[in-house]
Image (cartoon, grey):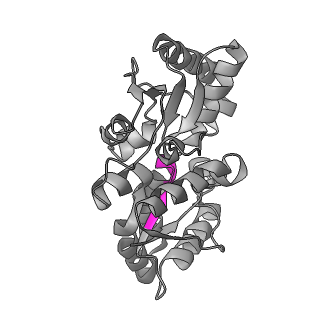
């Protein structure tokens, strides 16, 4: 299968190894990965901050880059929050525009957009990616993954198939880490308290790594743990699944 990779702003600017790991996993499974170099942002930051007029051109750009006559067959996005933006808000933005062609383009594109764990389990029918990661790992499931995408136990199933990995369930795993994009800036005290609660739950697992589907959450959690001068490292699920006994560690 030919899979188009959409790299989100966070990953592009701060966590490039996540995208590289996605490519490693998909190519190991025998798929061809393409990267459309004109891609930009999905518009989530603008939309969630109330700048919906500024988000609309970014949606049009996404439709132009991945839809149309040369449209991507399957689109992989290693970020639950960006997939939630596309699935939940693109239809609303298109409907608000009153443009029948934009509405049609969004409807045609949505079935081809997958979060990374969804792509592996639901689209490709894969749980064992051939990974080897001999460490104790816990999992933070982001709010968008849990409540918008309803990924369920897909990430956990993928982790449990990794050779050498010891999976440790996380207490209060349904609780937010406190990031929430600009929420962490506008409500920093509340955000910090939520992050501290999440960090305590992670520390209680005695895990060496905390995995997640969103690097935005991992940045929040990792920053909190680093200020506590203890605790596990944070790592995107894709980086664990890309690891092998030949190398390629996070």
The image quadrant of residue 52 is bottom right
Q: Is residue 98 visible?
A: yes
Q: Quick check: 106 left or right of 151? A: right
Residue that appears at 52% across and 28% down: 210
Residue that appears at 34% across and 47% down: 128
Q: How many marks?
A: 0
The percent coordinates of residue 225 (x first, y second) are 64, 19
- Which region of the structure is painted magenta? 75-82
The percent coordinates of residue 140 (x first, y second) are 46, 30
Q: Is residue 27 above or below residue 104?
A: above
Q: Is residue 9 above or below residue 133?
A: below
- Image quarter of the C terminus: top right
Q: Is residue 187 visible?
A: no
Residue that appears at 70% across and 14% down: 229
Seen from the viewer's position, the closer of residues 32 and 48 is 32
Q: Is residue 152 above or below residue 84?
A: above
The percent coordinates of residue 42 (x first, y second) are 57, 61
- Image quarter of the N terminus: bottom left
Q: Residue at the far front: name it.
A: 246
Q: Is residue 21 magenta?
A: no
Q: Is residue 230 above or below residue 124?
A: above
Seen from the viewer's position, the closer of residues 85 and 24 is 24
Residue that appears at 51% across and 19% down: 198
């Amino acid at each position: 299968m030919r899979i188009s990779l959409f790299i989100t702003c966070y990953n592009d600017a701060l966590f490039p190894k996540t995208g590289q790991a996605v490519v490693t996993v998909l190519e190991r499974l025998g798929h061809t990965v393409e990267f459309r170099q004109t891609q930009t942002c999905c518009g989530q930051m603008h939309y969630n901050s109330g700048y919906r007029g500024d988000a609309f051109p970014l949606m049009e750009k996404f439709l132009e880059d991945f839809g149309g006559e040369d449209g991507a067959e399957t689109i992989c996005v290693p970020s639950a929050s960006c997939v939630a933006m596309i699935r939940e808000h693109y239809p609303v933005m298109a409907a608000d525009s009153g443009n029948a062609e934009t509405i049609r383009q969004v409807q045609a594109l949505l079935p081809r957009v997958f979060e990374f764990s969804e792509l592996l389990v639901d689209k490709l029918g894969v749980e064992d990616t051939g990974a080897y990661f001999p460490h104790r790992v816990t999992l933070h499931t982001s709010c968008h993954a849990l409540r918008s995408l309803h990924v369920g136990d897909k990430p956990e199933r993928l982790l449990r198939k990794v050779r050498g990995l010891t999976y440790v369930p996380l207490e209060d795993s349904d609780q937010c880490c406190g990031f929430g994009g600009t929420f962490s800036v506008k409500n920093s005290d509340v955000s910090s308290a939520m992050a501290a609660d999440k960090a305590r739950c992670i520390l209680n697992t005695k895990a060496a790594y905390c995995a997640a589907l969103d690097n935005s959450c991992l940045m929040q959690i990792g920053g909190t743990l680093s200020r506590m001068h203890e605790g596990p490292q944070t790592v995107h699920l894709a980086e664990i699944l890309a690891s092998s006994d030949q190398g390629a560690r996070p």
